[in-house]
Structures are given as C-alpha cells and as structure tokens.
Amino acid sequence: MKLSAEKLNQHSPYQLVQINDMAFGFVTDQHIQYKVGFYKYTYFMGDGSYLFFIDNIEHEHGTYDPKILDVVTLILEEFFNQEPTVMLYICDPTDQRQAARDRLYHLWFYDYARNHEMTLYSDSVTFKDTKYYTGILLRHDHPLHDKVLTYYQKFISHVPERYTHQEK
C-alpha cells in the first residue's frame, strides 16, 4: 500500500512531505512539526492491519488547530480507499497523556466513522498501574468485519505486553 503526498496536497490545508509510503510530515501555522501515518502492525491478524500514529515531533503545544483534523481526515480517506484494511491505534502512555489522546482520537474517529460507514470500537486495559487506550476502525463492508471485531476483543488484553513505543 502506498499513500501519495502529491494527491493529498491537492486538498490538504498544510503541505505534506512524503516520509515513506505510509507517512507524512507537515508544519502547522504555529510552526509545530508533525509526523502522521501508518505502519504495518502484524501482531493483529497478521497482514492487512496498520497502526495509526500522529507525532508532535518537538512536543510543542499550541492552540487548537482544526487544520490538523483536516489533514488526518484526508489521510484516513486515502487510506481506506485502498484495499480492505484495518486501522488500529494505541495511545502512547510514556508521558501519562494517553487518556487525553484517547479522548481526541475518539472524537476524531467517531465523527469520521459516522460519516463514512465505518465501525469504531475502542477500549482500554490496565497493566501494572498503566492504562492502555486502544481502538480499531474499519469499513462496515470489510469482508472479515465480524471476525476482526472478535479478534480485537481478544487482542486488547495483550496490548500491554506487545506495546512498544516505536520510532515513527
């Protein structure tokens, strides 16, 4: 699978720079640098699933920027227009801000799912005093829809032992 910055830049509010086949960099009006994209996540049903990430590279905080959601939405649309895929997310717990990330992701992905005939399911698991928030997004017409959701419920309990913060 390959996503195209050239194609996305036709509608993106920020200029996207292709990092690899599945990831992009961009700089906001507030001069905050982000990386956003996906990487193959074989721990979940082998092939065909991808882990979503968005990374504030320098960990700078600005004011609310709706253009970031616009970028994420464009990238999601391009992603789900490809082959039948499954998108997972695991909110990074390393800085103890995973609950805030989960609220933001849930808001973003719930609206996206509702408007694009998608299924969003999210949950959390606590392990050694750390709460791991995770979610899955897939099309209603995914050929393995019910099987994917069943497998996700089993997968959740293994998130703490399989989660490793990956360089994006």
Image (tube, helix red, strand yellow):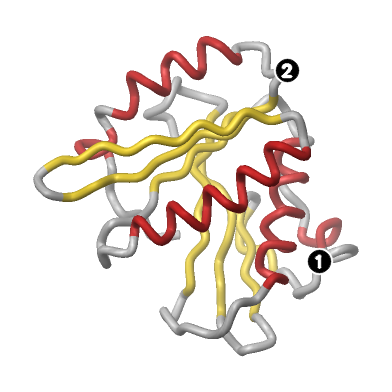
Q: Residues within 10 Å of mark 1 (few under 14, many from 20)?
A: some
Is the residue under label 2 in contact with that under label 1 (CB below 8 Å)?
Answer: no
Query: Could you say where residue 134 lies in the image, as x and y percent from the top left?
Result: 40, 41
Q: Which residue is mark 1?
A: 12
Label number found at residue 123: none
Of label 1 and label 2, which has the lower sequence position?
1
Residue furthest to the right in view is: 10
Q: Quadrant of residue 34?
A: bottom right
Q: Which quadrant, please, contains the N terminus?
A: top right
Which mark identifies residue 141? 2
Compare residues 18 and 65 and report the one nearer the observer.
Answer: 65
Question: Is 39 located above or below residue 96 in the figure?
Answer: above
Question: Residue, x 32% and y 38% (percent of image)?
Answer: 124
From the viewer's perspective, is 158 left or right of 31? Answer: left
Identify the amino acid type marked 1: Ser
Q: Residue furthest left?
A: 128
Residue 17 sits above or below residue 48 on the image: below
Kind of residue indicated by mark 2: Asp
